[in-house]
Image (tube, coloured by chain):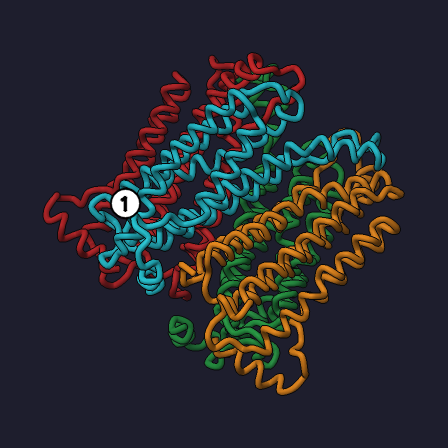
Chain colours: A red, B green, C orange, D cyan
């Protein structure tokens, strides 16, 4: 509506993604009683941190691939308005929040592998994030509101179609969190990989043609 | 005075905003005695963190919308000088400080909901921030000192007028902090939303015309 | 020598400056025994944090104004080589380190106002930083090694002259740290302000002319 | 495959590098019992932190020089695809992880200088990082997949050749970690410096010519 370029919006978002993904490492803490830990005890300590490593990698992959998708959307989104800025802030709010449920899940799973609440909170965060991603994209792409004039309509439709899966997928992991925590984390990781690959246009015709259209912006 | 472009000033500011808004999540800490917290106890623990979530969302909204406004000002500000750089640093100093009163307020409200000092500090920070934002804008826009030559005068006046409300609004929440803490936080959140929407020019004539002026820079 | 543009070097440096300046806030921690702190006790607690606030503002000003100077240097530096990249990394190493002596000084001064070691470490860090800044600039400006062809020679000489004061100034605060800690911090703050203002060219002729030269790059 | 420009990929990576390198400082913590530490005791405390300073500088140099190399690769890489983005994320995952083994090594070496496990974890992280760097570059440079059309083939070969040393070098430090921890850290530092200097083309002919080719992008 009122602005033109998305450059600074993207730069700010890149910054937030970069900080949030890096803060994940703060979940790892050296032992608090190091004086008792010679190598054999330290090995046990590190072994106990496997759930943390697992949650760290999954959250890293999720935030990283969210960034790839953010990047992909903003190749098509050329203009901004107040609504887009607020929806983008809402998405970033969830991205920024991820390190907390990650640390919570890792801590709980290491101590109480039979408990489910932390995994429920973790997956629930991703459900909301998937919904926000859809809102952002639908808002921008509705009647080409904020897209470029020469937008590749098939690429836009491919994104819209792929993103429909987001909330559905994450609702499945949300449900799984009540049943089996490791399976829930693994599925979250696999879904992240699914969104790493760009969606296909409705029919698989002329993919070379589509990539040509894309390469010129 | 001495510089021309504001590009690196904006990039640095974007970085500071992005880090400060992301550090807010560090207020959330997993339980320190996790071994005692099975799911039912963890649920109580998380429930106790609602004031934290509330303060987190409000501070996130405030910093995020401060960023939107910073972005909006620098669409008009085309040049920099030492004065602007120092005023911008002063504003960033307050932005960077926000995670501390946020954590303080969240901690205090969870334990002593009848106490007011943390909310007073929290709101007081925002009063000073609103004053700094005004200083920055008045300094840059005074006699068009640092604005572009082809600046949209009506948009400039709209910003100047809207920003007059800032210190007044935040003085109200500051006063409210002494009376009712939840009301104070809610009002802070609403004021953030008020500043998310761009100010209107003095008279509502030809908004399409104004947006045309804006869209060309 | 081998590269041309300094864009990504500046972007990376901006990021490091932005994160380091924001991490300063982590020195502030909410009280560890909040259940005992009703408003009157909290007020005492916050009052005890004044040295922290003082050290925070001084370090913020120092890093912020270091950034302004970095910005100022790289208006003249147009090319990079491995030497410049390593010297820049060395400078960033010191910038990144600042939050630690800041936290140390603030903690020590609150508890042992009669002790000097923390202030010595704090000022010592700034001495080394001032030396590194000089190395960086001398390396880049030596025989115009990495400056633009149409560089403003008077502006370059003004920077070189002003930077000579850096190590001398900070050696004074370093000495003062052994004698009087508050005076040492105040002087650090004043020196930061001195470097906020750009140096004057050797003779004050045609400052308008100089600014014209500058404004065209 | 699908994208053209690497600008935002580089900006995001710069952000992650900048945050990770700055978070290293969080390994330094002021003393937890400051009330007992007057200057003489504080001096002992700081002296005990020498291994930390040593590990901090080595990790800073390693991440910093990884950034220089990332910068160097992306002068040649002009296009991106999903594979490159994922390999870049994998590399960033390791960069982001570095502060943890650094803190672990510093803590362990200060308390148990005769133990090796922390150094093994530290060096092991760098082995994997070196392998990832090779993957990223081989993927991008294979048949010039993602390089510019007018790429300097000799510079590309120089990088490919230099990077072959990476995994070999870091395997040596990995082995050394089992034998002598200080030697292992020193060697890590020296290897970082080796990668700071750009690799030489296969034969040392016409380096001026090569730099001319480079300087035009």
SS for callout 1: helix
Question: Is C77 left, or right, of D103 in this rendering?
Answer: left
- The residue drawn where x is 60% and y is 63% is C68
Residue D31 in which image quadrant: top right
Position in image of residue C12 (x %, y %): 49, 53
Residue B6 visible within the image:
no
- The residue drawn where x is 50% and y is 62% is B71
Q: Residues within 10 Å of mark 1 (few under 14, many from 20)?
A: many
- The residue drawn where x is 56% and y is 64% is C71
Question: Is B143 left, or right, of C9 in this rendering?
Answer: right
Residue D57 visible within the image:
yes
* Front-most of residues C5 and D154: D154
Residue D180 in which image quadrant: top right
Question: Is D187 left, or right, of A158 in this rendering?
Answer: right
Position in image of residue D148 (x %, y %): 25, 55
Residue A28 in which image quadrant: top right
User: Label 1: which residue?
Assistant: D140
Specify the quadrant that holds the N terminus of chain B.
bottom right
């Amino acid at each position: 509506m009122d602005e033109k370029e998305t450059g600074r919006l993207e730069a700010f978002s890149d910054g937030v993604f970069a900080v949030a993904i890096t803060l994940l490492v703060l979940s790892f803490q050296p032992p608090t009683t190091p004086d008792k830990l010679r190598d054999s005890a330290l090995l046990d300590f590190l072994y106990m941190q496997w759930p943390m490593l697992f949650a760290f990698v999954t959250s890293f992959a999720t935030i990283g691939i969210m960034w790839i998708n953010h990047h992909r959307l903003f190749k098509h989104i050329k203009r901004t308005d107040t609504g887009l800025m607020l929806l983008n802030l809402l998405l970033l709010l969830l991205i920024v929040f991820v390190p907390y449920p990650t640390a919570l899940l890792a801590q709980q799973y290491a101590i109480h592998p039979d408990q489910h609440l932390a995994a429920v909170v973790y997956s629930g965060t991703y459900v909301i994030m998937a919904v926000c991603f859809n809102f952002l994209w639908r808002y921008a792409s509705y009647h080409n509101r904020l897209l470029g004039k020469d937008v590749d309509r098939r690429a836009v439709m491919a994104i819209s179609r792929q993103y429909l899966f987001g909330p559905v997928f994450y609702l499945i992991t949300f449900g799984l969190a009540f049943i089996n925590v490791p399976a829930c984390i693994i599925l979250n990781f696999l879904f992240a990989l699914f969104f790493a690959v760009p969606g296909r246009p409705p029919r698989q015709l002329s993919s070379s043609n589509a990539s040509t259209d894309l390469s010129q912006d």
